[in-house]
Image (cartoon, grey):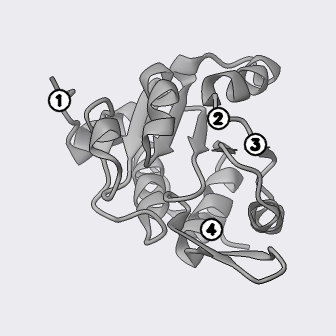
């Protein structure tokens, strides 16, 4: 039986307890498309407004991490560009992947929100204090999450989530512009 979904107002209320937002990459921060050149060079399409809101959220005090089942130099480059301090890649078991980070930050699974899009994300979504999925996520993931965004992955879903975070802390994102 699918888990009942939060309203946006309830989502905002739940964000008051979140200390870290963990995000899958492919299908969440991107539109789930990979471009490969003949030499294996990989390119991804990231949504610029998601990136801006990620930077502003970090300035407001939210910890951010990306948790990806596959390694990608393109992901590494984009996250470095944004200043994302926790870039975890290359492990299919995302619970095992994030556990050492939570220990280092002295956080529990209850302290995190996680946004994913695929069946690979289910185990971490089931452990996270707040589980989120993008609009075009796998129906199997949608069944277990607390909230589903209106926006698709790579098309402003992370921005939508972070707007709820700013509302939860009673701050305007523009306050954190440099």
The answer to whether the residue labelled 2 contacts the one labelled 1, judged by CB atoms less than 8 Å apart, is: no
Q: Counting residues from the N terminus, which is met first, the one under dot 2 or under dot 1?
A: 1
Specify few, some or many for label 4: CA neighbours under 10 Å numbering under 14, 14-19, or 20 or more: many
Regarding mark 3 in the picture, which secondary structure is present there?
loop
Q: Which mark is residue 51?
A: 4
The answer to whether the residue labelled 3 contacts the one labelled 1, judged by CB atoms less than 8 Å apart, is: no
x, y (%) of residue 119?
43, 38
Q: CA distance from mark 2 to mark 4?
A: 24 Å
| Camera-nearest residue between 23 and 91 | 91
Decide if residue 131 is on the left or right side of residue 150: right
* Residue 53 placement: quadrant: bottom right
Q: CA distance from mark 4 to mark 3?
A: 22 Å
Task: Name the residue: 41% across, 33% down.
Answer: 131
Q: Which mark is residue 90?
A: 3
Q: Counting residues from the N terminus, which is met first, the one under dot 4 or under dot 3?
A: 4
Q: Which mark is residue 92?
A: 2
Per the image, the residue denoted by label 1 is: 4
Q: Which mark is residue 87?
A: none
């Amino acid at each position: 039986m699918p888990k009942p979904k939060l309203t946006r107002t309830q989502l905002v209320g739940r964000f008051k307890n979140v200390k870290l937002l963990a995000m899958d990459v492919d299908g969440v921060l991107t539109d789930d498309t990979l471009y490969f050149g003949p030499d294996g060079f990989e390119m991804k399409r990231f949504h610029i407004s998601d990136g801006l809101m990620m930077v502003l959220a970090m300035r407001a005090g939210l910890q951010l991490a990306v948790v990806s089942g596959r390694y990608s130099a393109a992901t590494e480059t984009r996250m470095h560009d944004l200043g994302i301090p926790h870039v975890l890649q290359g492990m299919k078991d995302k619970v095992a992947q994030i556990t050492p980070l939570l220990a280092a930050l002295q956080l529990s699974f209850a302290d995190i929100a996680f946004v994913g899009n695929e069946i690979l994300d289910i185990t971490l979504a089931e452990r996270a204090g707040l589980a989120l999925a993008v609009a075009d996520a796998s129906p199997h993931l949608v069944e277990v999450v607390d909230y589903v965004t209106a926006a698709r992955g790579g098309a402003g879903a992370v921005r939508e989530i972070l707007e709820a975070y700013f509302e939860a802390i009673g701050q305007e994102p523009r306050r954190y512009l440099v």
